[in-house]
Image (spheres, coloured by chain):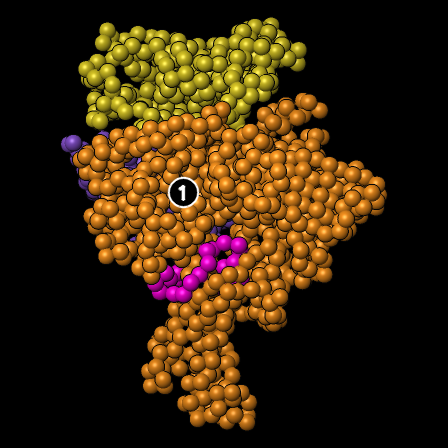
Amino acid sequence: MKFQTPHSVEDAVAILVADPDARVLAGGTDLLVRLRAGHMTPSAVVDIKRINGMRDITSENGGWRIGAGVACAEMGEHAALKADYPGVVEGAELIGSTQVQGRCTVVGNLCNAGPAGDSVPALVAAGATVRVAGPNGTRDVDVIDIPTAPGKTSLKEGEFVTSVFLPARAANSSDAYLRFIPRTEMDIAVVGCAVNLTLDDAGVVTAASMSLGAVGPKVKQVDASALVGSTCDDAAVEALAAAATAAATPIDDKRGTIAFRKDVSGVLAKRAARAAYTRAKGAST
Amino acid sequence: MAKDEFEKREFKIVGTRVPRPDGLDKVTGRARYGADMSAPGMLFGYCLRSPHAHARIKSIDTSEAEAMPGVKAVVTRADFTHVPASGGTKDILDNVMAGEKALYDGHTVAAVAANSRSAAKAALKAIKVDYEVLPHVTDVDEAMKPGAPELHQGRQQESVPEGFSQNVLARSQYGHGDVDAGFAKADIIVERSFKTAATHQGYIEPHACLASMGNDNQADLFCCTQGHFMVRNTCADIMGMESGRLRVTASEIGGGFGGKTTVFLEPVALMLSKKSGKPVKMTMSRDEVMRASGPTASTSIDIKIGVKKDGTVTAATGDFRYQSGCFYSMNGALGAMCGFAPYDLENLKTVGWEVVTNRPKAAAYRAPGAPMAAFAVESVMDEIAKELGMDPIDLRLLNGAEEGTKAAYGPTYPAIGLKATLKAAKAHPHWSAPLGENQGRGVGCGFWFNFGGNTSVSLMINPDGTVNLSEGNPDIGGSRASMSMMAAEELGIPYEQIRTIVADTASLGENDVTDGSRVTFAVGLATIKAARHAIEIMKGRAAATWGIDADAVEWVDGAAQPAGPNAGKFPPLTLKDIAATMSKTGGPISGHHEANAEGAGVSFGTHICDTEVDPETGAVKILRYTVFQDAGKAVHPDYVEGQLQGGAVQGIGWALNEEYIYGEDGTLQNAGYLDYRIPVASDLPMIEPVILEIPNPGHPYGVRGVGETGIVPPLATIANAVSRAAGVRMTSLPMSPPKLLAAIKAN
Amino acid sequence: MSRIHVNTTINGDAVDYLCEAEDTLLDVLRDQLDLTGSKEGCASGDCGACTVELDGRLVCSCLVLGAEAGGRTVNTIEGMADGDVLHPLQKNFIEKAALQCGICTPGILVAAKNLLDHNPDPSEEEVRYWLAGNLCRCTGYDKIIRAVLDTAAEMRGAA
């Protein structure tokens, strides 16, 4: 195995094009586990962290662009980003331990294409896009379209994700992400749920989106229209929960059962909706 | 019964909280654990493991691996030509290197040594094993049924009645009285069935060793183990060598909890070293630790208890079915002995079953067999308390064992501390603190035998008056500090003047494994006696110096002095004075003691736990936890507390989330810390330890072992708390959220 | 196979080493530099026994490639004491019996020091969550958490 440290996106693409068995290294918190376990034997590892901009969080068109090498802990330390997208940041900050936080990235979490990635549901609910660099230049892709199945992405040969973009926030908007795990830390989500809301000045929901993790082969967008026109009252939240439970298509595995995941999808939908609503209202005052 | 050794006395050092002698090395990274040693020219050894739960090994072709660059040796079972003398050791050999069959996912079938880690791992992939996959069984109840896939033939003991699979190796029975007559007298009978999943000891340090063996049939082995004398004896038997030719040195040990009371890598490393002629280092990955080293038994248990309206138990029965992996273990018998040990019962019958399945051979785990039994018995006791509307502590006090009680496993108890722990629990503010919504409080009792065993200690007086103590038991939780304290107490010198080391197998007499909570008791007893031996010699030197009778000398505060005015008037001779002149008064001075220690005092504990259950998700939060345990005498209270706290938290993990999960194909699904979920710091509150001291008559200071009892009550205590919080009796461990939520919804 | 030459700084000293691309920083520390204070408990980032600081941030050294450490600074348990003067956390872990077997202790000390460097007055809950990635199987964490909180108080008092 070779270790490559390109200093430009073009160089990185050239390496990836020339060597289809090469793998991109950002935080390494998934890649190194697979390497050590012998589950993956790439011909080269391409460390993209030395490319300019990969480790930056920058304001762009009122939104935020987050480089592919930005550690999740760095997102948590970015006050303005956190104020705009507390749910995205809390999802990112739930990945792994303090030690893993210092390395793991949301782009890595996305491209790992695990159904239970904690940072992905809130990115999807936020309508985030990623910028993909490849032999034919760059393209922007909706986050939801990157994973296609467990462990599989829509990235083509020679392509890699250079950044994720969170769009500008409307007034009175916020989000929340909650997951269920058996312990308080260090587990993979058994169910994850993100809710993203925009309110009018009277506190009525004007736009809502929700996505669920770990209840299907990839993150699932769920119709959250039950909340629109409401003030997140009990009836609206119960309707949202029913939608979440109905939409979940989980499997039985070592982390949970189908029945449990469907039930908890509804529970987390309620709790995340209320948390996002409280934040969005707080944002308006 | 052992003679009464206990003498009441005032302590100067025992009972204080001195810094441990190995502390500095351990906070600076200097301490050498199993994987931290290297040797010049060392090779790296790795195991090839079966991917199948049960398979006949038709052939193994190692030729390609042997020809690879850097590869210096490949071994399979064919290299182990010596048949071990002991049947138990034969099972160990079958476990460390599969013979005709691979019996579980992870069973070693071959091993490689090469001059780099990567070369060794590459060679593993080049070994070709032709398996004939066989049907498998991993569940205890399934394994007992006639027609179940069978692991062995001809190993079933005569105690097993007809109608069971050959997987049932043994049946044992305990009890007394007439249970039918007893149940006939009962006003209420509660009968429940329980299941518990297998758990792993979860020590953070994977197994590791460094072996060096030459063609002169002499060998050195450095390894992490709970008993290096056991490693020596077992490996020598497997290798067909004389034990005196194998010197084993124990590394610092990164946790064991019973899981390092046997060997896994060591014989393989020795064989690789012998074959390659070079030192070989082997370390397990976490995956290997989980798949192939000592989990505990999984169980299926039926309990029936009858009581009168006032709470008096009239009869009790228990059927304890334990699977202990692919070889014989006596876990079921231990469950049958321990489950009812806290109670004074007129009529009792318990049966223990030993069952084999396609899982790794179980190793001991802290009070092996007892926590699951206590879970079942104490859960039924809680049900009875609820039905009677009785305080569950009062129910236990009414039926609790005390001095003179005929124990569930046969003998009659001497002075014991069960009722003291119950009374302390009842009087503690925790028991009467208010509870909120969705919260519940549980209580549970537990028992462990404790052990003495073979022990050798040497205590050397150095010319400058310092003292070295050599003991032969790896220090797993601060025992070097405890031994130094007891030696200092006896000798009457400062703690800092003594340095205790764990000697290798060529430097000290035989010692049993660090298990059975035996070290502070048995090694402590031997330490005290070795110190007394040295004192006798020093008194003799003083007597000779003064020209008086040795009987006329006494030892007070670290010095010899005349035993009264009649003995003569001489200024005291301190240990330091005597040491300084010892070469002129008769030569070096050392004390020693060797014994198969008897008189280990049984130990009881009572735990209280508050939990909060999220009724929408089944998540359980531990709100408060208090441990009451009889330590006999706490030599170093900090480390006694540590044992109680650590045992409780391991029990919390067992009760809530830890479990071996096997797939349909019989392979382990969660062979790592990600999905084998041991408690993390944020899961827990502080664990309050309350130490009670009811002296053990079998030890000069009254010491009882404390290491194991602490894991016995938690499973039941937490189950009782969760059952009360959730309003539904939980009879299956772990009470993971999916299981608990399903139970809540079904209720 | 050609190996990678890496220049880095470890515990304040300029260090260089040759490693294979697969080697983790933990492999390099333990096998090449004999800095065996960092332990391998899982090799998957789940136990924290290999915790070191990389450019001041906590990482599991099993999840960092040795080749990535070029030009960066690494601090391990071996660099925590100042000569023969122990860090207050080290001193208190001994005095307050915050270790039993000690295998997790180096990782926990490195992680706890990093916490106190950033947050001199953490709550019990903050300490527990900060250290959630450092597994300890012996102690039940009680005495560890107390030792960290007591050290924080002591260091604030001394400051």
- The quarter of the rendered structure image containing the N terminus of chain A is top left
Residue B503 lies within the magenta run:
yes
- The quarter of the rendered structure image containing the C terminus of chain A is top right
The residue depicted at 73 percent of the width and 44 percent of the height is B316
Q: From this viewpoint, which residue is outermost toward the left?
A: C2
Report x, y in % for residue B304. 73, 40
Give amino acid for label 1.
Answer: Asp
Local crowd size for mark 1, using a 10 Å CA cut-off: few (<14), some (14–19), many (≥20): many
The reply to whether residue B429 is in sight is: no
The residue depicted at 80 percent of the width and 46 percent of the height is B182
Q: Which chain is purple?
A: C
Report x, y in % for residue B608. 66, 44
**Closest to the observer, B51 or B99:** B99
**Closest to the observer, A136 or B366:** B366
The answer to whether B130 is drawn above or below residue A8 in the figure is below
Report x, y in % for residue A128. 41, 12
- Quadrant position of residue C52: top left
- Quadrant position of residue C46: top left
Circle 1 SS class? helix
The colour of chain A is yellow
Report x, y in % for residue B113. 25, 41
**Closest to the observer, B401 or B435:** B401
Disc 1 chain ID: B
The residue depicted at 22 percent of the width and 48 percent of the height is B278
Question: Does B427 sit left or right of B534 as displayed?
Answer: right
The reply to whether residue A2 is in sight is: yes
Label 1, on which residue? B94
Question: Does B452 sit left or right of B403 as displayed?
Answer: left
**Which residues fall within the magenta stretch?**
B499-523
Q: Which chain is orange?
A: B
